[in-house]
Amino acid sequence: MDYRQLGRSGLRVSTITLGTMGFGGSGWAAAVGQIDVEGARRQIGLARDAGVNLFDTADVYSSGTSEEILGAALGSARDEVLVATKVRMPMGEGPNDAGLSRHHIIRGAEASLRRLDTDYIDLYQVHEWDGQTPLEETLSALDSLVTSGKVRYIGCSNYAAWHLMKALWTSDQGGYQPFVSNQLYYSLQNRDIENEIVPACVDSGVGILVWSPIAGGLLSGKYRRDVEAPAGSRHLGEWSEPPVNEEDKLYDTIEELVAIGEGRGVSAAQVALAYTLAKPAVTSLIVGARTEEQLSDNLAAAELTLSAEELGRLDTVSGSPLAYPFWHHANTSSDRLSPADLTLLGRHLS
């Protein structure tokens, strides 16, 4: 297991993070897993044995049950690992039970600390954008949590590039703690973040934590063109996150993953994870599994390094044409591109 600096912070995190959405698994999270405390202890043990030091949850996962199970399963080992959780989503029916107001953030942090049975949160992330609360209010509330010692670092999740840059500017102007990370969806199934968000993260020194790096299992190799998926698998038509808009390209990508995996003697899922882990600004991949066998397979991806030729094959099969203004940049500005520009344009230049 390698460890990477989280953005411009001094914190080093494992390249694989254990996701805990399946801990408790009720309501909409039931399809991800229904893992009890003992099952969580086993998964945490497997992850820690592999070198994982970051565990990611959220207050909204099973209405707080995921946090409770994570706290109980870590027990006395809590201070030996890093715990990340999130705030923003509805936690009740009241008008102030969602969003990124000072009221909801402070109340949410206190509730998460109780459920996790801990005195501090290592990484407190805003789960989603709130376009109706002033950023100054959100960031000052988060800053006060860091100052009080209840939170060590702050991050965002699902932020567009302009959201991120506005937040970083607001932090700079107000003297608030800045976001050190942006937790994002990124996989071979959809590489949209490469256009704007990845360059913004590279340029500003923000680390990327990747959620659903095998697209909710779509890239596991179970779903093949004209092949019946195994019993109990979720089918393409049931996916809403991530949406599948180009089914043929998805199947072509899966075939390439399977081919590379067969050549390496590893699973398609491991190849998909190794691909995303090799991309710019990516600090860690959040993996969650319904079974310990799935988890062990995913953890093994930390030791897999793909060749430039293999990465190129996957880039080609999963890629999309450059959007404007990026094709224009490639045609006319290639003499003065920054490292952030080259994360997208580098492979398109002759």
Image (cartoon, grey):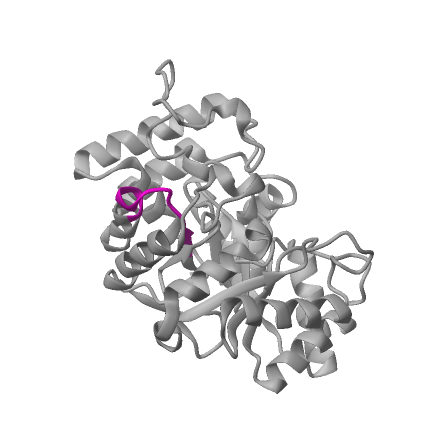
In front of the other: 47 or 349: 47
| Direction top: furthest residue | 226
Residue at left 41%, top 59%?
Answer: 284
Query: Which residue is painted at 33% across and 36% down in the image?
Result: 313
Residue 292 falls inside the magenta stretch: yes
Q: Is residue 279 above or below residue 245?
A: below
Q: Give x and y (percent) for residue 230.
A: 34, 23
Q: Nearer the viewer, residue 116 or 224?
A: 116
Using the rendered image of the protein, determine whether residue 336 is visible from the camera's viewpoint: no
Q: Residue at x 68, y 55 (%)?
A: 91
The picture quadrant where one finds residue 143 is bottom right
Judging depth in this view, the residue of 180 and 92 nearest the camera is 92
Quarter occupied by the C terminus:
top left
**In which quarter of the view is residue 201 placed?**
bottom right
Q: Residue 248 placed where, x, y %? A: 46, 21
Frontmost residue, 12 versus 7: 12
x and y, in percent, of residue 164 in the image: 65, 62
Determine whether, in the image, residue 153 is placed left or right of residue 275.
Answer: right
Please give the range of residues in magenta: 285-295
Judge whether residue 12 can be spotted in this image: yes
Relative image position of residue 222 (x, y in whole percent):
34, 27
